[in-house]
Amino acid sequence: MNVAAIILGLTDAAILILERVGSLRQIAAQSGELTPEQELELDTKMAAAFAQAKWQPSTPPE
Amino acid sequence: MKKRLLPLLLLVGTLAATNVLFVAAPVMLTGCAHLQTNADQVVVRSEQLAAGAFELMDALVEMEINNRDSLRKLNPNIERVANRIRTEGRKGLEELRTATKIYKAHRTPENKANVETWIATIENLKRIAREYLVSSKPIVP
């Protein structure tokens, strides 16, 4: 493993956090029940993510 | 020596980043938003939890898959935690959303209890992931 890989890994983690700060703030600001449109948006977002490779269980090596 | 420190730095960095998400998010989710007078507290809590937990779990599985080779060598248990999130976390989030929609349509005590059960399940999964990531405790499969 080289330094570039380390830096890329740490950068990746930092970017992931920054990408989600906005969403988390938006969620925290929610003071009422979601509207049907907001519900659809959330469910669509989750379904799209669950279909991606990152959500498929891996097979750890023996 | 330097070669041994670099993977450790990646692991620590990745875990620290994940911890920030798991530790900071509950604080952010209990922010200063005031509940609307006509809002059902269980529904608001359930919808906030589903959205927040999804963001955290999504970040965790993405970090794990992006750094899998390195993390596998350093601590294979991280992959097990991520896989548990991928199976139980996903199922729990889907069940929580379904239970919430059913309760919103029919606000009975039974449906409310079902929502609360799935809230507890998701909270527990968040706790397990967080505790493991913070203290490197072995997980119970």
Image (cartoon, coloured by chain):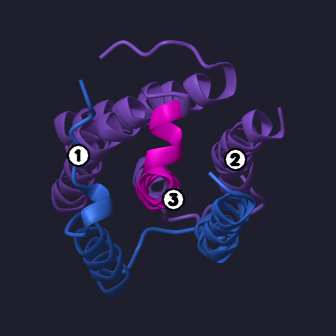
The amino acid marked with disc number 1 is Pro
Q: The blue chain is which one?
A: A
Question: Left or right: where does residue B11 sit relative to residue B98?
Answer: right
Looking at the picture, how far across and down is residue B1, in whole percent?
A: 83, 32
The amino acid marked with disc number 3 is Ala
- Judging from the image, mark 3 belongs to the subunit labelled B
Vertical placement of B84 versus A51: above or below? Answer: above
The span from disc 2 to disc 1 (Cα, nearest Å) is 22 Å
**Magenta segment, principal secondary structure?**
helix
The residue positioned 52% from the left and 54% from the top of the image is B56
**Quadrant hosting residue A29:** bottom right
Structural crowding at the residue carrying mark 1, measured as other residues with C-alpha within 10 Å and reported as few (<14), some (14–19) or many (≥20): some
Query: Which residue occupies the foreground of this view, B81 or B66?
Result: B66
Question: Left or right: where does residue B119 sit relative to residue B88?
Answer: right
Pointer 1 residue: A57
Q: Are marks 2 and 3 in contact (CB under 8 Å)?
A: no
User: Which image quarter holds the C terminus of chain A?
Assistant: top left
Compare marks 2 and 3 and give the one earlier in the sequence.
2
Which range is magenta?
B50-73
Q: Which of marks 2 and 1 is in front?
A: 2
Q: Is mark 3 on a helix, strand or loop?
A: helix
Pointer 3 residue: B59
Q: Which chain is purple?
A: B
The span from disc 1 to disc 3 (Cα, nearest Å) is 15 Å
Looking at the picture, how far across and down is residue B140, in whole percent?
A: 36, 12
Pointer 2 residue: B10
The residue positioned 60% from the left and 30% from the top of the image is B133
**Circles 2 and 3 on the same subunit:** yes
